[in-house]
Image: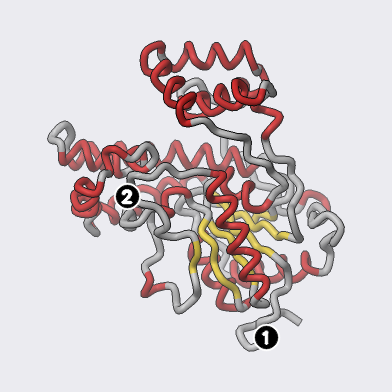
Amino acid sequence: MRPTSTSPEPPASVIAVVGATASGKSDLGLELAQRLGGEVVNADAMQLYRGMDIGTAKLPVGERHGIPHHELDVLEVTEEASVARYQVAARADVAAIRARGRAPILVGGSGLYLRAALDRLDIPPTDPALRSRLEEEALEQGASVMHARLARLDPAAAAGILPANVRRVVRALEVVTLTGRPFSATMPTRRFLCPTTMLGLRVSREVLDERIDRRVERMWRDGLLEEVRGLLPLGLREGFTASRAIGYRQAVEVLDGVSTAEAAIAETARATRRYARRQESWFRADPRIVWLDAQAPDLVERALDVVCARALRHDPSTGDPPPPPGGAGAMPDNG
């Protein structure tokens, strides 16, 4: 029998709701938490930041229906988001939620953060001085030169990182320099720490783009510019991670007088669509995800069916669920 709000026994140790931005993850995660007696653990890197609410589509406190939400508002905008820090904190949250007899429900679209929390992954060391030096070299020499250096040292890692993604290139070079091992060797294996059900929300390209456009316009109507204006005295410009957040960077340009609101809205929508494509590519590669139609009128019921069925079929020795029969639930290639 399917658990309900009157039968809060969690059907699986951990549930994750993943997918592209604007696919409806927050709403589904909240519904599952209500139905299963669960608590939500945020897995969106930008929602870690205190005060970055409108531009990250953070679910307002008044709309959480009393469901505890963890890993929200835990960083100042001047702090750098760290996968290693998040891994420790999110795993502690999951353990505490399970100890309370409740269901941990991770919700978000930051792929590496999700895998750091759920998979068997050792975070490689970091050296701030080395990182700073590599970042300076990237500014002086350019992204393509740094990527070419990585290609010589670790071809596998370079093949998986876009040359324009300077931050990832620098991180890979940092790990190779510190450990003498390929950065690619530190990537997580697809092995869960404990029994986990991953639900992915799929949306057609046309519908997702429309949702993104509407969301961006709504953010600006709801006061994104004023939110950013209030964050500038708190150090938003100096924040290595926060200052690069989509929407916030464009809003700063408007406040600086180098862009118009119309141009900023259009660029925010374009950047968000590009980000959504990268999210789709990341999650599409994970065969453990059971994909659900985000527009299905009975989405919550379908999700509960998957969660309950998987709970009976998890391999307790590995934490890994079997693949869906016949490849059911595979995510379509939207191009």
Q: Is residue 194 above or below residue 243?
A: below
Q: Nearer the viewer, residue 164 or 302?
A: 164
Q: Quadrant of the C terminus?
A: top right
Q: Residue tagged by mark 2?
A: 216
Q: Secondary structure at mark 1?
A: loop
Q: Of circles 1 and 2, which is in front?
A: 1
Mark 1 vs mark 2, CA separation in Å: 38 Å
Give, as a three-letter code, the residue at label 1.
Answer: Ser
Task: Give the amino acid at mark 2.
Answer: Val
What crowding class fits label 2: few (fewer than 14 Cα within 10 Å), some (14-19), or many (20 or more)? many
Residue pictured at 63% horizontal, 88% vertical: 6
| Residue 267 position within the rendered picture, expressed as x and y whole percent measured from the top left | 30, 36
Callout 1: few (<14), some (14-19), or many (20+) C-alpha neighbours within 10 Å?
A: few
Q: Residue 48 lies in what quarter of the image?
A: bottom left
Q: Nearer the viewer, residue 296 or 25?
A: 25
Q: How is the image coloured?
A: secondary structure
- Pointer 1: what residue? 7
Q: How far across and down, in percent of the image, does residue 122 sit?
A: 68, 41
Tell me what residue is drawn at x 76 percent, y 61 percent: 195
